[in-house]
Amino acid sequence: MDNLLILAFSAFILENIILSQFLGICPFIGVSTKRSNALGMGMAVLFVMLISSSVTWLLYKYVLELFSITYMRTIVFILVIASLVQMVEIFLKKVSPALYKALGIYLPLITTNCGVLGVAILNISKEHNFLEMVVYTTFIGLGFLFVIYIFSMIREKLEFSPVPKAFKGAPIALVVAAILAIIFSRFGGII
Amino acid sequence: MNNKDNFFKGIIKENPLFVSLLGMCPSLAVTTSFENALGMTMGVFFVLVLSNLLISLIMNNKKLAEMVKPVRIPVYIVVIATLVTIVEMVMHAFTPALYFSLGVFIPLIVVNCIILGRAEAFASDNKPVASLIDGAGMALGYGLAIMSISIFREFLGKGTLTIWGDLQLNLKFIFDFLKIEPIAMFVQPVGAFLTFGLILAAITAIANNHKNKLAKEVKNNG
């Protein structure tokens, strides 16, 4: 139990997917100008990450390892993720139009989000068992949601502040991210 | 467009990292040392040049192109993923230290937006040789960008420059001369965001300056 708690905490704060592992930076900079967009993107990433990591984990353990073709990992994973995202899209459209409306436009963007493939691979290379995989992925996804939401609030305020001309847009966003990264790295003392 | 322009546009005018902001994740993660950035550049170069060549060969063949058109994105992804797997295996076999320090970012070359972007925007409707040159220019532009970030980060953070393996430039004497310690923050995640942000701001400032000058010249001349 203790192990799982530590795993969850470090996935959420210390190994934060954006601020310390640098995965999913494109949506972090691109879709964080408005709070509602950030929330939608964060939820979509959490959702897809959990499904795709579970599927790829099972596939790796029970198909790739069984036939000892683990070198096919990258090809299989990216194809599974790309088709899964499509399936999730079709499924949501049918089953829950409300959820589809909220997440729909973010789903196609997620295929190329390196966070989803990255976490699927990390779960394999860290040799997590199924329970650890679920906890790790959930909290990594929550960490993404948390940071992108905070970041979008800051960026909404930034729009009205006198930023030097050269820093407008991405540069100031990166500097803000640096300050957030300092704050998150200081939580290291807790464990 | 001649071959020379085609090659050089990727390095300055349309630099994938500094101008189009593509492929940011690895550029932040692997720039802790010059060696890592160099390794990443070689991986991206190999994948981008060959994927551009292969995809333009596929799309220039009428019969194949017709077949591939409706499912072209999955086809591109399979081509790219195969090339990335080759890079992964070669690095694991010949440069294991580099393989482990780049870690998850080698397989992640698959989802690097630059490669899929060039396949879709350039290779799919250009001749093979032009695509090859475009790929080489883009990969080199990306490589120079991440290597320049890594030079700043490694010098400020550790006071050294690791070029390859044991070949290392020790520049600590500059810090000794100024009577300060290297700033360890720059090799941590914080430094990645900060360095990239500041370099990007500097480039924007220079570009703005250049644009203003051009506008003034146009005004004076006519």
Image: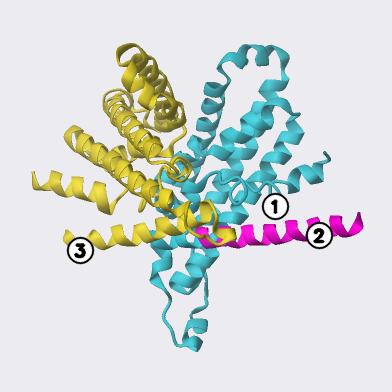
Chain colours: A yellow, B cyan
Q: Which residue is found at the position 84% from the left and 40% from the top?
A: B2
* Chain ID of residue with mark 1: B
Q: Which mark is residue A189?
A: 3
Image position of B180 with respect to B4: above or below: below
* Mark 1, residue position: B12
Pointer 2 and pointer 3 on the same chain:
no
Q: Which residues are magenta?
A: B196-222
Residue A171 in percent (x, y) is at 52, 56
Image position of A42 with respect to B171: above or below: above
Residue B74 in percent (x, y) is at 52, 22
Judge depth for marks 2 and 3 and give the one in front.
2
- Screen quadrant of the C terminus of chain A: bottom left
Q: Residues within 10 Å of mark 2 (few under 14, many from 20)?
A: few
Task: Count numbered badges in the picture.
Answer: 3
Q: CA distance from mark 2 to mark 3?
A: 55 Å
In the figure, residue A138 lies in which quadrant? top left
Q: Mark 2 or mark 1: which comes first in sequence? A: 1
Camera sees residue B30? no
- The foreground one among A122 and A136 is A136
Q: Amino acid at mark 3?
A: Gly
* Extreme-left residue of the structure: A1
Q: Which residue is found at the position 55% from the left and 58% from the top?
A: A167
* In the image: residue B157, left or right of residue B127: left
Task: Describe the element under mark 1 as helix, strand or loop.
Answer: loop
Q: Amino acid at mark 2?
A: Lys
Camera sees residue A86? yes
Q: Residues within 10 Å of mark 3 (few under 14, many from 20)?
A: few
Q: Which mark is residue B216?
A: 2
